[in-house]
Image (cartoon, rainbow, N blue to C red):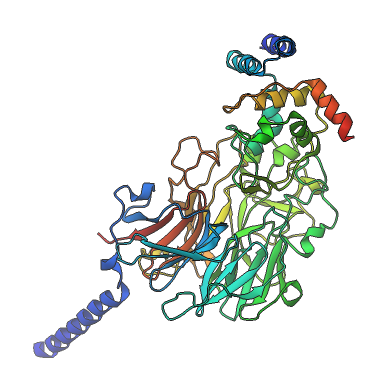
Amino acid sequence: MKKNILIPTVLLTAVVFCIFSFTKITSFPGVNKLPKADADNAGLTLPAGFSALIVADNTGQARHLAVTKEGDIYVKLARAKDGKGILFLQDENKDGKIDKQTGFGDYGGTEAALKDGYLYASSNTDVYRYKLNDKDEVTDQNNPEKIVSGLLDHGEHNSKSFTFDNDGNLYVNVGAYSNSCQEQDRQPGSMGIKGCPILDSAGGIWQFKDDKANQTYGDGVHYATGLRNVVGLDWNQVDNALFVMQHGRDQLHDLFPKYYTTKQSAVLPAECMYEIHKGDNAGWPYIYYDQIQKKQILMPEYGGDGKKTADKKYLDPVMAFPGHLAPTGLLFYTGNQFPEKYKNGAFIAFHGSWNRSPEPQAGYFVAFVPFKDGKPSGKWEIFADGFAGVKDISPRSAKHRPCGLAQGPDGSLYVSDDSKGTIYRIMYQKK
Amino acid sequence: MTKILVLTFLLIPFCLLLNRRTNDSAKENLKVGALVQKTKLPGEKVFKKYCISCHQPDGGGVPHMNPPLINTSYVLGDKEQLIGIVLKGLKNVKIEDETYTNPMPSFKQLKDQEIADVLTYVRNSFGNKASAVTAADVKAVRAKTK
């Protein structure tokens, strides 16, 4: 009887041990290869167990970025530097720091993303794609394929951020070229234009095919409307849906001082995370979301007074953040390097406010929201802070402003800074 | 406090008068600068009410969005152009290769004296040093832009 138990027990232990050691090897292939973090964690404050290093510095106005399977980095600059609007950063000696920088694409813009053997990048009017070789290097830097062109650029809110689904579609933001669709943009007391005409060609998300050349408005689907400006957006693989971060309207007190104090204006309206499906309307410029009253409030330009709610119900956010933090990057974490809590959760780069003065400015950090089954499952928290590097932050005094987010092949999180052009890499190492 | 403000208010034209006689702009700058150090210029109140949210307490503006007021010819240069910007507003201005995309609305609803005060304040704050703007300057530009 004893023998009968002993043999299967030994076998089982052996099998479990084998599986365990195999899992350990395959799940964390990069752990031992992580580079050395900077002694000061690149000046960032991070949760316990996390560390950071600066992989590149002074790259220019680094907006969004993408990391290849080889660990090379494509960075899109807001403005071309020496005729190069896209940078290709390589780490040839594999010490974690960039030692080779080349560039191409003589246009400024925001987005850089990888999909199915192509690098996609956007100017402020167009989306291009560049064929990659098996090392993820662009084969012809001077002749990209123009996928989308002719999107509106009136200066204000002109970032053409985009992301992809798994069915061959591209989702492009066309921001509203206005704060709140006033007759006179940002003029104190000016009322909203009835039936805001901006919404026919901006203030929303357009869907295009990701492999079809020369598309413009007429070829795309007007996927969602009532979104003032979206710079950070990502496809949630668990939910199989588009998530966007909207930049809420500015200057409630400046424009309507009789309804809003400077203190209220500093935190209202909410910066909203929306889950977007075809046909959704998030309500700009008719309503905003008030995270304190937890309600959709009628905009003062359209008859509101800070309390009145709208007759028509618009899309509610899945999460509401304090006002003016300026979310510029959204990334759902699918890597294995970080602890389980972070899996499929959302990282958000908050560029930082300007519209809170005379109250102190806020943001200038990367936040995290835990997700379960494609929905937020807890409160948001600050993940990485200290980018500004000064006590009294102003948009001009901030040393760095987090903008874009990307995930490396080993699960490291990369953050770009469009002030000084610093590229950060954040890592987690088990003690 | 009000007395000091009134006094400052009265001092500016007086200083200007003095300087117009000597016709020495360097001296004028020095005097307006000294004035800033001693008392608050009346334009600070106007700045805090109408300008601070976009141009920021440090006058640095917001990169890509709202232009800085520091060390730029728009502020320190031609008064007529500067007054015109306040009266008419401005959009997509380019300063040293950087485009600022948020539109500035017109502030023509402000009185000549308020515009003169705020521009004098801006031209002598955040490290700036330039001659004062008078209500008469504003009145002249307003008449032209009508």
| Left or right: where A33 falls relative to A355 | left
Q: Position of residue A365 (x, y in %)?
A: 48, 49
Q: Quadrant of residue A199?
A: bottom right
Q: Choose between A17 and A284: the one closer to the eye.
A: A284
Which quadrant, please, contains the C terminus of chain A?
Answer: bottom left
Q: Position of residue B45 (x, y in %)?
A: 69, 24
The correct choice, above or below, for A141 with respect to B63 in the image is below
Q: Position of residue A109 (x, y in %)?
A: 60, 60
Q: Quadrant of residue B49?
A: top right
| Left or right: where A87 falls relative to A358 | left
The correct choice, above or below, for A150 with respect to A326 in the image is below
Residue ID at (67%, 32%): B75
Residue ID at (73%, 77%): A219
Residue ID at (74%, 10%): B21
Q: How many circles with numbers are drawn on the protein? A: 0
Which quadrant, please, contains the N terminus of chain A?
Answer: bottom left
* Residue A140, visible in the rendered structure: yes
Q: Position of residue B40 (x, y in %)?
A: 63, 17
Q: Choose between A109 and A361: the one closer to the eye.
A: A109
The correct choice, above or below, for A222 with respect to A401 in the image is below
* Residue A346, visible in the rendered structure: no
Instruction: Looking at this view, name the residue that lies furthest to the front.
Output: B23
